[in-house]
Structure formats: C-alpha cells, structure tokens
Image: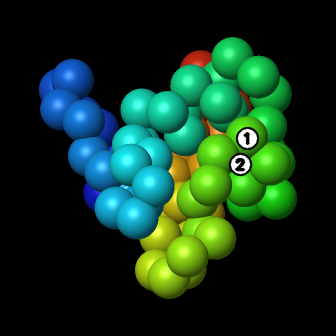
Amino acid sequence: MSNFGSQGVCMYVCLCHGVSDKKIKKLILNEGITDIRGIKKCTALGSQCGKCVRQTKEIINETLAGEYRQAS
C-alpha cells in the first residue's frame, strides 16, 4: 500500500494538468466516481502524456478498499 496523500500532504498525480491525489479522492468519496473514466470526465487527467493513469487507478483501488474496510 502506498498511502497516497497521507498526513495531509498533497501529491500531484497529473503534472500536465495539476490534478492532485486529494482531488481524485474527493471525486471518489463525494461524487461516487469509481473508475478512471469517471475521473477523466471531471478532470483533464490522462489527456496529455497519460503517465498518471496507472497511479490514478491505484488511488481509486486504495480509496475504495479503505471505504469497504470501514463499512465492514
């Protein structure tokens, strides 16, 4: 587990468009987005170089897994 954005530190996932891990987590937790396609609809993530897509998928999976653990 990589603990993206732990301890309140903001990490930019998409440098091309300035999308942070906190923005991605907020979209997942507050807007109910659960996949990369949804994130791309709300941000410009992945539309330039695409290097951020894999890391974004990891953040999605970790955030959803954390929510699942909290719910059970």
Q: Are marks 1 and 2 in contact (CB under 8 Å)?
A: yes
Percent position of residue 17, x then y: 45, 55
Residue nearest the observer in this picture, 72 or 56: 56
Q: Position of residue 20 (x, y in %)?
A: 39, 43
Name the spot of residue 8 as percent of width and height, x first: 21, 23
Residue ID at (38%, 49%): 18
Depicted 56 relative to depicted 7: above or below: below
Q: What residue do we see at 80% from left, 48% from top?
A: 41
Q: Amino acid at mark 2?
A: Ile
Going 55% across and 40% down the picture, which residue do you hit? 24
Q: Count neighbours of disc 2 (C-alpha within 10 A) and say few if under 14, some if 14 to 19, many if 20 or more.
A: many
Q: Is residue 65 visible?
A: no
In which image quadrant can residue 9 be found?
Answer: top left
Looking at the image, residue 31 lies above or below residue 63 = above
Q: Residue at x 55, y 76 (%)?
A: 48
Q: Which residue is mark 1?
A: 42
Display coloring: rainbow
Label 1: state its secondary structure: helix
SS at mark 2 in the image: helix
Viewer-proximal residue, 58 or 20?
A: 20
Judge from the rendering whether residue 65 lies leftward or rightward of residue 40; answer left or right.
Answer: left
- Please give the residue where the numbered disc 2 appears in the rendered image: 39
Of the residues tagged 1 and 2, which is closer to the observer?
1
Q: Amino acid at mark 1?
A: Cys
Q: Position of residue 66 (x, y in %)?
A: 55, 35
* Residue 12 badge: none
